[in-house]
Image (cartoon, grey):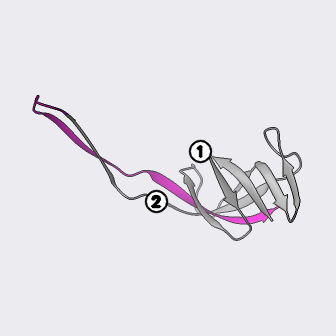
Amino acid sequence: MYAIIEAGGKQYKVSVGDSVQIEKIERAVGDKVSFKPLLVADGDKIKAGTPYVEGVSVNAEVVEHGKGDKIVVFKYKAKKNERKKQGHRQPFTTIKIVEIK
């Protein structure tokens, strides 16, 4: 059984027991989080929602917060001696899927 959930404007395919890194959410470590699934598949039975599947929820637990790998943003204008170097680390939250019911 798996479900497609939406978090932070992105969609993730999850099953029970999976750990997923999603966009940062303001919850403490150990808190329970519930998501409405966009699609639920159980064997050969598939339920798709418009936009969410009614009567089904995906429950998860917050495992940790962190920052992703650094990316370097380098902007310049040719022949103008204009350069700008920036670094960015995207914050994330790791969740563990507890149940799909």
Task: Give the image location of residue 10, x and y in percent.
Answer: 60, 46
Task: Give the image location of residue 65, x and y in percent.
Answer: 50, 59
State the SS at label 2.
Answer: strand
Query: Is residue 43 found left or right of 35 in the rendered image?
Result: right
Residue type highlighted by circle 1: Gly
Let me know if residue 79 is in the magenta part.
yes
Residue 47 visible? The answer is: yes
Q: Of marks 1 and 2, which one's residue comes earlier in the chain? A: 1
Q: Main secondary structure of the magenta part?
A: strand
Residue type highlighted by circle 2: Gly
| Residue underneath mark 2 | 66
Q: Residue furthest bottom?
A: 17
Task: Give the image location of residue 63, x and y in percent.
Answer: 59, 65
> Quadrant of residue 31 in the image?
bottom right
Segment colored magenta: 77-100
- Mark 2 nearby-residue class (10 Å; few <14, some 14–19, many ≥20): few
| Residue underneath mark 1 | 8
Residue 101 visible? The answer is: no
| Residue at image coords 89%, 49% | 55
Let me know if residue 49 is in the magenta part.
no
State the SS at label 1.
Answer: loop
Depth check: 51 or 101 in front? 51
Decide: is 83 above or below 15. above
Depth check: 65 or 10 in front? 10
Q: Residue furthest top?
A: 80
- Mark 1 nearby-residue class (10 Å; few <14, some 14–19, many ≥20): few
Alpha carbon of mark 1 to alpha carbon of mark 2: how far?
Answer: 15 Å
Q: Nearer the viewer, mark 1 or mark 2?
A: 1
Decide: is 21 above or below 24. below
| Residue at image coords 57%, 49% | 25
- Label annotation for residue 69: none
